[in-house]
Image: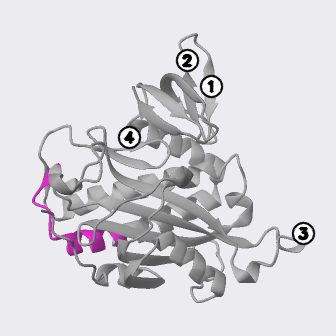
Amino acid sequence: MMIALKAATPQLPRTTAVADHVVAVDETDSTNALAVQMIGDGSLTLPDHQDGELAVAVVAADRQTAGRGRNGHKWVSQPGRCSTMSYAVRIPRAIATDESANGWLQMIAGLVTLDALNGMIEEYGAAPNQPDCSLELKWPNDVFCHGLKLGGLLSELVIPPSSGTGTDADVDDDVVIVFGVGLNLALGACRLPTPQSTSLQLHVSGLPSFGEMRDAVAERQVEGFRERLVKFIADPKGQAESLREEVKAVCWARGRQVEAHFTDGTTLTGEAIGLNEDASLILRTQDGTDHTVRTADVGVL
């Protein structure tokens, strides 16, 4: 019989030292929902974006009772085993709403997450169990290892109270993007929620305790969001090309036969050959036609 795990308030000393604001609770329905609520009621505020500077706030919980993924999917996590964090950043509205650029925000979140996980592994002298245990991104929002889901990301745009109601006078105001990041760090094989999921400890030996891992990864994510988003805000087009090359090296779907499932129930099957300039996926069907996929769940065949 599986023993139920008790939630406890996350202890995040390293994250607190680098973040502008940290909210930690033992349990909530969703860290993204809590962050959105606190931004909306003014209890979580972030300074206006300034050139070269970016504030990052963190909302963390040990247990989520209604964790969410993209397209209405549920995110199942377990206390003391899974990291559930949301990172709130304030960026220019013009970038957040520009469809030619805002797709890269999700890609940046994925790269920040990979950097944080790999950096933590290196810091503690841990090592993969097999040479091919590399972490990859499954477009557009999953962290994969050996073709299995280790983590998921969900981004949401929030209009802070001070930004008004969207009139011409405030089109250049900042908005807040909340990046929810769920990671299976210390789940044993018997606790995995689905056969398609996995956990970091199943692929890497010599890891520290779950609490240390969670804090070390979150610290790096705060710093990573700050560094990468400052660069992106300063030069979206230039950074997009650089990010496109970077994602190519860690894109799990690239070169595979995949099936895209759209929200209207339709599907499209083909080879994922890369990303467009706006971060959308290029899917080449059997007849040689390239299709652009912007919003879909993508699974390998």
Q: Nearer the viewer, mark 3 or mark 1?
A: 1
| 3 or 1: tag closer to the N-terminus | 3
Asked where in the image residue 13 lies, by quadrant, the reply is bottom left
Amino acid at circle 4 = Val
Circle 2: element type:
loop
**Up/down of 96 relative to 261, above or below:** below
Examine the structure image and report whether residue 225 is included in the region drawn in magenta.
no
- Please report whichever mark, 2 or 3, sits nearer to the chain's N-terminal start: 3
Name the residue tied to disc 2: 285
Q: Which residue is mark 3?
A: 168
- Would residue 228 be visible to someone looking at this image? yes
Q: Are marks 1 and 2 in contact (CB under 8 Å)?
A: yes
Give how far apart the Cα atoms at labels 4 and 3 are: 40 Å
Task: Locate residue 45: give its quadrant.
Answer: bottom right
Read off the magenta span: 203-218
**Mark 2–mark 3 distance (CA, rounded to whole Å):** 43 Å
Q: Which residue is mark 4?
A: 250
Q: Residues within 10 Å of mark 4 (few under 14, many from 20)?
A: some
